[in-house]
Image: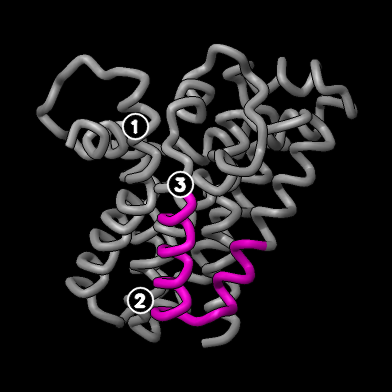
């Protein structure tokens, strides 16, 4: 239960009145619950969509997106912004890119990417609201968090001593691999093969770019993977509505 609570507290701003001293082992185990946290976010979105109904889809899509961002506290958007600045300002240099990622300031490239990704999400949500596609709203946040687990299982972490490294070192590999496969099969069952294929292709592209520039991933890359996976899957579903 402590590992589940850690996952909820780390990935969301859902207030849980629970305080305890966490161990590195529990941080590693908490990654197993990331997809479940995504499912919890999806349930909240579905609940709000059901309350709102299907009229005025543009406004309701905007409300859903605001809620979506608010639940996570913009955590993954921050990672996307840092990656955008690093890729633009890093000039192909690994050291310069990593240094830019640690800078809390956001440059114009970061702002542009945030606007583009949020605009894409909103446009896709408009179509999903029109069709009351609750299955997609339920599954997409899970796929975004599943992308973090997939990255942890397949790609080296390049910030020694960071929280991400502690998670990877203590991540139970066999349960994580089984969980990854099981969640992907559930996605196939609920919303078809295309979203799964899109999520895998986006993940592979991010992994390839991160390996070429950084030699691995950072926490910011995990955040970018969440946002880009969600946006791409939403768009692919909306285009086939």
3D distance between C-alphas at marks 3 and 2: 28 Å
Using a 10 Å C-alpha cutoff, classify the residue at mark 1 as few (fewer than 14 neighbours), some (14 to 19) or many (20 or more). Answer: some
Q: Is residue 213 left or right of residue 226?
A: right
Q: Residue at x 49, y 40 (%)?
A: 76
Using a 10 Å C-alpha cutoff, classify the residue at mark 2 as few (fewer than 14 neighbours), some (14 to 19) or many (20 or more). Answer: some
The colour scheme is: one colour
- Between 146 and 116, the one nearer to me in the picture: 146
Q: Residue at x 26, y 55 (%)?
A: 40
Q: Main secondary structure of the magenta part?
A: helix
Q: Which residue is mark 3?
A: 174
3D distance between C-alphas at marks 1 and 2: 25 Å
Secondary structure, mark 3, is helix
Residue 238: percent from the left, percent from the top? 53, 78
Q: Which residue is mark 1?
A: 10
Q: Which residue is mark 2?
A: 135
3D distance between C-alphas at marks 1 and 3: 23 Å
The mark nearer the N terminus, 1 or 3, is 1
Residue 189: percent from the left, percent from the top? 41, 80
Q: Which residues are magenta?
A: 177-200
> Vertical placement of 178 versus 137: above or below?
above
- Between 204 and 238, the one nearer to me in the picture: 204
Say whether marks 3 and 2 touch (CB < 8 Å): no
> Vertical placement of 159 versus 122: above or below?
above
Q: Which is more foreground, mark 1 or mark 3?
A: 3
């Amino acid at each position: 239960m402590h590992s589940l609570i850690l996952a909820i507290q780390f990935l969301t701003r859902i207030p849980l009145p629970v305080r305890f001293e966490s161990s590195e082992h529990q941080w590693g185990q908490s990654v197993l619950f990331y997809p479940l946290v995504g499912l919890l976010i999806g349930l909240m979105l579905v609940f709000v969509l059901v309350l709102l109904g299907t009229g005025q889809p543009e406004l309701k899509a905007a409300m859903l997106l605001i809620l979506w961002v608010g639940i996570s506290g913009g955590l993954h958007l921050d990672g996307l912004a840092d990656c955008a600045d690093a890729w633009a300002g890093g000039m192909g240099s690994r050291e310069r890119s990593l240094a830019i990622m640690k800078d809390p300031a956001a440059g114009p490239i970061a702002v542009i990417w945030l606007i583009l990704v949020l605009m894409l999400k909103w446009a896709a949500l408009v179509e999903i609201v029109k069709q009351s596609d609750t299955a997609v709203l339920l599954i997409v946040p899970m796929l975004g968090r599943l992308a973090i687990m997939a990255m942890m299982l397949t790609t080296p972490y390049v910030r020694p001593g960071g929280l991400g490294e502690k998670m990877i070192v203590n991540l139970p590999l066999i349960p994580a691999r089984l969980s990854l496969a099981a969640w992907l099969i559930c996605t196939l069952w609920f919303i078809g093969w295309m979203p799964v294929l899109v999520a895998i292709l986006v993940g592979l592209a991010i992994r390839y770019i991160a390996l070429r520039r950084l030699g691995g991933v950072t926490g910011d890359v995990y955040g970018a993977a969440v946002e880009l996976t969600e946006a791409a899957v939403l768009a692919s579903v909306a285009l086939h509505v």
